[in-house]
Image (spheres, rainbow, N blue to C red):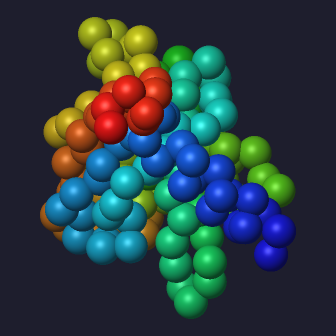
Amino acid sequence: DDLYQAYQSQALSAQRTKNKIVVEGAGTPEVNGTYIQGGVHEGIPMYHMEGIWDDREVIFSVFVCTFPNGEKSWFITIVPQGKVPGKNTDVDFYKCSVSTSDACGMIPSKGWRQISNGQAPSPTCLFVTGCLDDKASE
């Protein structure tokens, strides 16, 4: 599938230069791993990782979504191909409320809880800043 090949080559070149999130300790092991920053949703960076769910190749995503009542939450989810993030077509695993202190787009490390397809325990998330130039570190 061309989308996945394009994603893989982009992910390889982005591996060291883009910001990342490391998801660890989730009771749903498929969501654990390193998510690479790519795209924005509601003005806040999104993060993506390819994986397998239900015997299919999917892209897991982490992003912020605003509810009709104005509350915001981070989600670890699968957005089906061709669909818009934050809709009821998403396959949700975990969510974490956005407090006003971290509304600038910093991923919360703790406070995640399982929803829909997520299993206990809930994960922790670590934000890793990318280095701008990998050549400089060699």
Residue 35 spot, x, y in % from top left = 44, 50
Residue 105 spot, x, y in % from top left = 43, 20
Residue at the front extreme, as displayed: 138
Residue 57 appears in view: yes
Q: Closer to the camera, 134 or 46?
A: 134
Q: Closer to the camera, 121 or 31?
A: 31
Question: Is 29 placed above or below 132 here?
Answer: below
User: How many circles with numbers are drawn on the protein?
Assistant: 0
Which quadrant of the rendered structure holds the C terminus? Answer: top left
Which quadrant of the rendered structure holds the N terminus? Answer: bottom right
Q: Closer to the camera, 5 or 126?
A: 5
Q: Is residue 29 left or right of residue 130?
A: left
Question: Is 79 placed above or below 2 here?
Answer: above
Question: Is 137 placed above or below 100 here?
Answer: below
Q: Residue at x 18, y 62 (%)?
A: 25
Residue 111 appears in view: no
Q: Residue at x 29, y 53 (%)?
A: 23
Q: Is residue 114 left or right of residue 90?
A: left
Q: Is residue 123 left or right of residue 13?
A: left
Q: Is residue 62 left or right of residue 91?
A: left
Residue 120 spot, x, y in % from top left = 20, 67
